Image (cartoon, grey):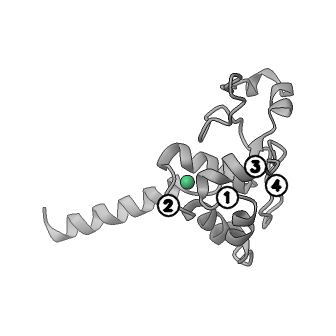
Amino acid sequence: MSQEIVFELERELTRSAERLTKVRPYECLVCYVNRMLEEFGCTGSRWMLRYRDLTAPRATALEERMRKMGAGCDCEVCLSAFEPDWHLIASLPRQFDRLRWNADTSAVEKASPAIPHCMGVRRGSTQPCLLWKRRPRR
Ligand SMILES: [Zn+2]
Ligand SMILES: [Zn+2]
């Protein structure tokens, strides 16, 4: 391959990576992190920090705040700090009905694809939408 083609490929890869990891309009932190985990898995705090950089760059304490809530990395944002509000999710209309909740363990499936589309937050917020609630500390 010529250098030019290699450079062009690299540019295209960068562009599609940016497309795939874009925050959707009004998407909340936790839905975004959950969606990225489904696609790419957990690699530390990468997704919460990317969310912050893209939507709320002044929320410099976000990582620290998440750590205090029990989330030392991205997967713990959706497992330890917050959990899906299954009660609310179960009450949503049928088109949202994609639940795959493990009733035996009441466990939040890691990066569960059962979470419906984000219900939205105002721009610049790092709060979760209504689909998520604080998980009680044990
Ligand atoms: Zn993790
Ligand atoms: Zn959300």
Q: Measure the alpha-carbon separation of dots 4 and 1.
A: 20 Å
Q: Nearer the viewer, residue 17 or 68?
A: 68
Between tags 1 and 2, which lies in front? Answer: 1
Task: Name which residue type carries label 3.
Answer: Phe
Identity of the residue furthest to the left in this view? 1
Q: Amino acid at mark 2?
A: Glu
Can the viewer see residue 27? no
The mark that comes first in sequence, 4 or 1, is: 1
Q: Say what amino acid the circle numbered 1 marks.
A: Ala
Give the residue number, with chain letter if any, for mark 2: 18
Marks 4/3 in contact by CB < 8 Å: the verdict is: no
Instruction: Answer with left or right where residue 66 lies relative to residue 120.
Output: left
First in sequence: mark 3 or mark 1?
Answer: 1
Three-letter amino acid code of the residue under disc 4: Val
Q: Residue sitting at 68 percent across and 48 percent down?
A: 78
Q: Which residue is mark 1?
A: 71
